[in-house]
Amino acid sequence: MIEKTKQSLSDIVEQKIQKDFFESYEHRAFLPTERELCEHYGVSRITIREALRGLETRGYVRRLHGKGIECVDESSAVVSRSVQTLITRSGLNYRYLLEVRFMLERQAARYAAIRADAWDIARLQDCLKQMLDNRASYDEYLSSDMQFHIYLGMASKNVLLATLIQALVMPLRSCIEQYTDKQMRLEPSYRFHAKILEAVITKDAEEAEKQMMRHLITTETLIENRYQQLPYA
């Protein structure tokens, strides 16, 4: 039986479920039924359902009709969506978005050079090949470009860093599409990515960070120049 405190009962149960089950359950396993959880914690079904809704919102569980309550790990996706919502609702100026990108992606390049494994490098190489193959298509090229940055973040092996970079991808893509010329030459961008990857492969952290900085500064200059040409600038 759970003792009452200043916290709501459903919040306490949510924390108990997280502690009792998520340290031992494997990914894609299922929680006990609602009835079993009610009996286990000595609370009502309404309280259990509120607790499960909280866990679902935070990316810990999802309901599968006819199967039960599945344990999942979607916390990174939840964080990404929250950051994207913050960016959208706060109407952040593109300059603030680029400032955060500078902070995150410099470190992603550095740590990717230190920690990337063969699988990370293979994925980055595949993105680079797609960029080369898609130079005639701005949209497809940009998709491969953004994916390269996502994989680079993952290669850093820092889950929080990778999650924040992924959260910025959609807003950054919108910013780039809005403030750059779709007829621009894509080869310079490709060369920056190639040099970043080369530094990652040779495990040269200083060079990886340097090439990422050059890439980001070039992108910022393109966006700033385009912005200054717009009538509302």
Image: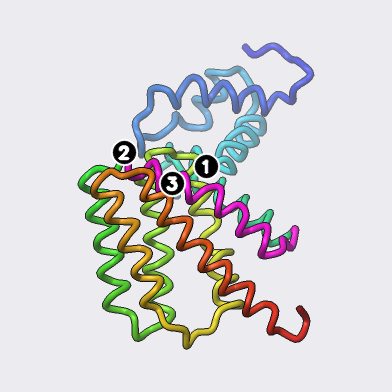
Element on which disc 1 rests:
loop
Task: Choose mark 1 or mark 3, whichever is in front.
Answer: 3
Task: Report the amino acid beneath label 3.
Answer: Ala
In space, the residues marked 2 and 3 are separated at their CA atoms by: 10 Å
In space, the residues marked 1 and 3 are separated at their CA atoms by: 25 Å
Q: Which residue corresponds to the image point at 58% horizontal and 64% vertical from the top-left?
A: 171
First along the sequence among labels 2 and 3: 3
Give the residue at mark 3.
Answer: 108
Q: Residues within 10 Å of mark 2 (few under 14, many from 20)?
A: some
Is residue 108 in the magenta section?
yes
Residue 63 visible (yes or no) = no
Q: Judge left or right: residue 182 versus residue 156.
A: right
First along the sequence among labels 2 and 1: 1
Element on which disc 2 rests:
helix
Q: How crowded is mark 3: few (under 14 residues within 10 Å), some or many (20 or more)?
A: many
Is residue 167 in the magenta section?
no
Q: Nearer the viewer, residue 90 or 38?
A: 90
Question: Which contiguous range is marked in magenta?
Answer: 90-114
Task: Choose mark 2 or mark 1, whichever is in front.
Answer: 2
Task: Report the amino acid beneath label 2.
Answer: Arg
Give the residue at mark 1.
Answer: 59
Label 1 close to label 3 by CB (< 8 Å): no
Q: Position of residue 228 (x, y in %)?
A: 70, 79
Q: Judge left or right: residue 146 versus residue 181.
A: left
Which image quarter holds the C terminus?
Answer: bottom right
Q: Which residue corresponds to the image point at 37% horizontal and 60% vertical from the top-left?
A: 148
Q: In the rendered view, would you say 25 is above or below 74?
A: above
Element on which disc 3 rests:
helix
Give the residue at mark 2.
Answer: 115
Task: Report the amino acid beneath label 1.
Answer: Gly
Q: Which residue corresponds to the image point at 34% horizontal and 31% vertical from the top-left?
A: 26
